[in-house]
Image: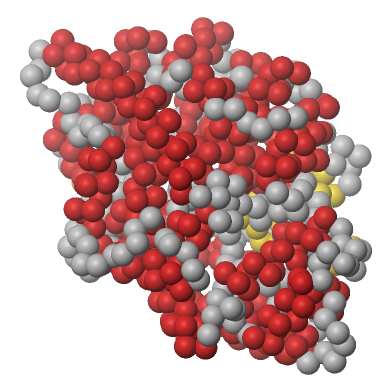
Amino acid sequence: MFTLAFIAIGLMLWSCAKEESNPFFSEYDTPFGVPPFSKIKEEHFMPAFKEGMKQQKREIEAIINNPETPTFENTIEAMERSGALLTKVSDVFDNLTSANTNDNLQEIAKEVTPLLSGHNDDINLNPNLFERVKQVYDKKDEIALSGEQSALLEKYYKNFVRGGANLDPEKQKRFREINEQLSLFSLQFGENILKEDNAFELVIDNEEDLAGLPQSAVKGAAETASERGYEGKWVFTLHKPSLIPFLQYSEKRGLREKMFKGYINRGDNGNELDNKEILSKMAALRVERANLLGYKTHADFILDENMAKTPDRVYKLLDQLWVAALPIAKKEAKDMQEMIKSEGNDFKLEAWDWWYYSEKVKKARYDLDDAALRPYFKLENVRDGAFAVATNLYGITFEERPDLPVYHPDVKAFEVKEADGKHIGILYTDYFPRASKRGGAWMNAYRKQFRQDGKNITPVIANVCNFSKPTGDKPALLSFDEVETLFHEFGHALHGLLSNSTYHTISGTSVPRDFVELPSQIMENWASEPEVLKSYARHYETNEPIPDELIEKLENSGHFNQGFATVEYLAASFLDMDWHTLTEVKELDPVEFENNSLNKIGLIPEIVSRYRSPYFRHIFSGGYSSGYYSYIWAAVLDADAFEAFKENGLFDKKTALAFRENVLSKGGSDDPMTLYVKFRGAEPKIEPLLKRRGLN
Ligand SMILES: [Zn+2]
């Protein structure tokens, strides 16, 4: 997953020491200007937000009151430079409320969110400002602009139009109300899930109930128990490192059901954390807003800016993949049902059995179990393996910098440099779960790359995940899924780090949603290449490289369970699209709607959509509404793009350079398809993806 900080326009380092004690009010006095985390206190945020908004308001007024004819420089670039303080405080705040939050920060978020939404609307709905932007836009063919400048102008103009600038005052008023309500609902939605995640616990006090679980899972549960005051017992939670091994290995079918239902009922428990009403209100507000702007549905509004362009094209891709994947998933279910029978049982396979039996089928068929692989995936080795891939491709290096400030003891800082030693940027890694962190894995920026008065402002990027922790005397040993996630988020990090953009607004990962997953997903390919595995996957005790036999098993099992994985994912993508292609949301029962949507495509009862609506954070609390399909859209791109490396060599310098120059460094400076074709020489084909997943 990838998150965008909310849009504050432009950034320029603000350097006037007004209030000595508030670190946001002076230039950061740290190496590379990273945030001085130990000096930033909760009470600094609100004053900095307020001052930041005040300053940007003044800067915007100055642009409007400029007596000169509007030009690209005195209007677009001037806007790009405005709001520096606001961006500075927002970047830190957004990162911390995701990765290391607490009740006080959440309170500040609730207080500041409507203020920011109003502030952004004040800019985006300002008729005089829009008039100036429009004048520049109308002259765009007569003035000489670089490719980057054209893209920036287009972005600003569209932002205004999409932000309601063309609406009459009455409609604008309603538009603002909708934005404000949506931002609050979205915050509430996410907060409810975080609380639901932390509230659930399965306490085991009878050792027999641990039957089948691997040692690491048992140890982790004992540690969680003692942290939560259940000395001598075991506690399992809905956090993935606890949940997944439980579903995979617990022999207690009833307990698996409890865990699974705990997970899929989040936000749907009829308590004060229930999200059903919130999400249907959000869906209704989104249609209303889309209609105000002249779009038929929210999906039409969103996709207009994406590579896919229309809902039809998204459905077309989803349908194509669904038809290929559903029969495979049904076959997988049948194999598991047979295994249940062969064990002398006569119950019907249920959704909470899927992980358990797929693990067994995998073991029987490929003699591969997750627990045998983990010793080869010590977190530090995997991380260094990902770094080494980047070094081999782009010549860049990573050096740990324990001297840099961090916001939590689990966080590590790395300096990233070019082959010739030139500084590129800073990468923070924050890999373990804790109650103050939301679920999932993501990349975000504490500072994006851009140029200011010709000077390169270097990026400060974070990778935040929820991986298996060290337990007892064992280091953190990852599952292969977690290995792929690490490579994935690292790919987003490279997109942010290798950005080479003049403008903040279109730099790094500021690209359409269905293009942003290309740099991340392509990295996952290297994680499983035998040549790469041999170098980083080393036994944590003996340092022996992973044996050929295990690599072969891993390769053979590559297509295993792909029917399930694809179907589970596609179901959630259809659900997202169905919610957002509604033309009307009136007295709708969200659960009924969801069931209808999934029945329509013929989802089998043994598989639950990867996200059910009440905890579908991507679409109701993140920025992926009508965009969850992006991952598979980008998978078509990444499978096709990786073919280029397979054709020319895994670490072919020329291919890597073309990828860096045309994709990683370009940000949103050009149309994604144009950039892709420049790299690949042709538009992407769907076949490499079908082949990779064994769906052809
Ligand atoms: Zn991602």
Q: Position of residue 505 (x, y in %)?
A: 71, 63
Q: Is residue 400 left or right of residue 539?
A: right
Query: Residue placed farthest to the top in the image?
Result: 549
- Whether residue 447 is situated above or below residue 488 in the rendered picture: below
The quarter of the picture where residue 255 lies is top left
Along the viewing direction, whichever of 507 and 172 lies nearer the viewer: 172
Residue in view at x 29 percent, y 65 percent: 585
Whether residue 395 can be seen here: yes
Q: Position of residue 62 (x, y in %)?
A: 78, 89
Whether residue 359 can be seen here: no
**Colouring chosen for the image of the structure:** secondary structure
Along the viewing direction, whichever of 75 and 12 lies nearer the viewer: 75
- Whether residue 117 is situated above or below residue 480 in the rendered picture: below
Q: Position of residue 608 (x, y in %)?
A: 27, 39
Q: Position of residue 239 (x, y in %)?
A: 36, 46
The quarter of the picture where residue 277 lies is bottom left
- Whether residue 478 is situated above or below residue 302 in the rendered picture: above
Q: Is residue 510 left or right of residue 623?
A: right
Residue in view at x 87 percent, y 58 percent: 146
Residue in view at x 25 percent, y 34 percent: 602
